[in-house]
Amino acid sequence: MTSHTLRVIASTTKYNVIMTWRFFSWTGFALRFATPLMTLGSAWVLFNYVYGGRISTEFGPAIGSSGYLSFITIGNAFYVFTFAAAFVVGRVMFWERATGTIEATFMTPMSRLAYMAGIMTAAAINALVDFISVFLIGLVFGFQIATFNVPLFIVGLLLTYFALFGIGLITNAITLTFRDRVTTANTLQVLFMVFSGIVCPIEFMPLWAQAIAKTLPLTYGIRLTRASMLNIGTINATSDILMLILLGIIYFVVGATTLRLIERNLKRKALFSVF
């Protein structure tokens, strides 16, 4: 069983990586950077020309020694990683239905979770290109690394990846049920963008916004990455790692269970290919 699962993950990963680069589009690649470029550009203008390069005494310790623009760059890099990785998994079943292959896919004996994991792995590999690209773009806007804790960076990235996989499974269940991907994806993008601390530390948000932020794995992934690069002493890395593990398990269990129940219901009612 383990060998079969690994083969499914490996073959699915290989297939999706090849297909992504075989039909690579510079236009599509560039569009993924529209939001980060607007955010970084706006932050650069505000910081340098509106506020004269100054930050408050309360804000300084929350963003680390490298400055506000480095803080913003890391947040946007993680946002691009999320958009390029998690949302690919969230649209798998929508495209399977749209291309007419969903019934054949569900008739195979392979593990659905292994299939999804392979797609997520391929998406994460491709998303690393976007992730690194945002850091390179950030150099133009003044991005600087104060320190680099490699183990903390890798742990934060992998745990965030696992939690996003669970969110992708939940999103698939939603798209299978409501036959919609655009509204779901746009809602999640806005939710992550506003409440994950991409442009502002969550400690400076209203209490109700902080409550939402604490349920999003991206919040902790961004904090861990900033802790590994910006030497922010106010971040408790151990606490964030534990929260990421907990959220990852919760999202994965909910996503896997929901997807299995919805698949069973669609099989029973023969609604796989019905729009």
Image: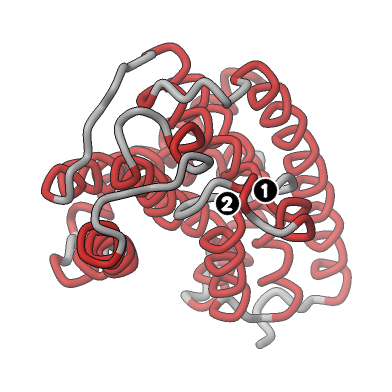
User: For this view, does 270 lie left or right of residue 198?
Assistant: right
- Label 2, secondary structure: give it: loop
Residue 190 lies, in percent from the top left, at 55, 69
Which residue is identified by label 1? Answer: 216
Which residue is identified by label 2? Answer: 196
> What amino acid is labelled 1 in the image?
Leu
Which residue is drawn at the image coordinates 82% and 47% (left, top)?
Answer: 254
Location of the N terminus (image quadrant)? top right
User: For this view, does 36 lie left or right of residue 29?
Assistant: right
Location of the C terminus (image quadrant)? bottom right
Residue 14 lies, in percent from the top left, at 33, 38
Which residue is drawn at the image coordinates 38% and 13% (left, top)?
Answer: 149
Residue in the foreground of this view, choosing between 21 and 73: 73
Contact between marks 2 and 1 (CB within 8 A): the answer is yes
User: For this view, does 227 lie left or right of residue 260?
Assistant: left
Residue in the foreground of this view, choosing between 260 and 48: 48
Visible residue check, residue 15:
no
The circle on residue 140 is none
Residue 155 lies, in percent from the top left, at 51, 20
Which residue is drawn at the image coordinates 75% and 49% (left, top)?
Answer: 255
Q: Which of marks 2 and 1 is nearer the N terminus?
A: 2
* Crowd around label 1: few <14 · some 14–19 · many ≥20 (10 Å): many
